[in-house]
Image (spheres, grey):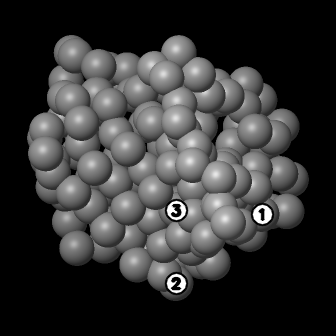
Amino acid sequence: MSKITVRTAEEGEIFLIAGGEYRLLISGEETGGNYAVIEMNVPPGGGPNPHAHPDMQEMFYVVEGEVEFRTDSGKTLTGKGGFINIPLGGGIHAFKNLSDQPAKLLCTVVPSGLEKMFKEVSGKSPEEAKEILKKYRQLVYPVDYFG
């Protein structure tokens, strides 16, 4: 039988990613590899450059603030209560907090694994992270990919 997991607001491993602070709420180790959930605290100006995860589906729920999501379909400003689904197969996407207030997202990845990459790249420079990203089959695109 599976164990119920409870995390307080003060618990969870912290990763420093894309200018933000990401907190691991539940890992793949705890879900049998089925999924992981990460709280993403994105400061003004924060967010990752265009990238893709070919081997996983990624879902975002905006808890606080707003972020601009960019995909091949265009740009969408998504605020509190908004939801974004990046289907399995590696849809290229990026997001950025364009406001002067922090934003908070809940990110679920299916299957898990992204949290392992986050742990390895946490606090690393983009140059240091390149080999780690390759190891996890993460595809990175130029900052101006979407024009």
Image position of 7 with respect to 30: above or below: above
SS class of the residue under badge 1? loop
Q: First in sequence: mark 3 or mark 1?
A: 3
Name the residue tied to disc 1. Answer: 136
Name the residue tied to disc 3. Answer: 109
Badge 3 vs badge 2, beta-carbon distance below 8 Å: no
- Pointer 3 local density, CA inside 10 Å: few below 14, some 14–19, many at least 20: many
Badge 3 vs badge 1, beta-carbon distance below 8 Å: no
Q: In the image, what residue type sits under mark 2?
A: Gly
Image position of 26 with respect to 58: above or below: above
Q: In the image, what residue type sits under mark 1?
A: Tyr
In the drawing, does residue 12 fall left or right of residue 99? Answer: right
On the question of residue 144 being in view, the answer is: no
Residue 57 on image: x %, y %: 48, 73
Name the residue tied to disc 2. Answer: 89
On the question of residue 38 being in view, the answer is: yes
Q: CA distance from mark 3 to mark 1?
A: 14 Å
Q: CA distance from mark 1 to mark 2?
A: 14 Å
SS class of the residue under badge 3? strand
Q: CA distance from mark 3 to mark 2?
A: 12 Å
Badge 1 vs badge 2, beta-carbon distance below 8 Å: no
Q: Which residue is more in the foreground, 74 or 12? A: 12
In the drawing, does residue 85 fall left or right of residue 10? Answer: left
Image position of 118 with respect to 45: above or below: below
Image position of 125 with respect to 117: above or below: above
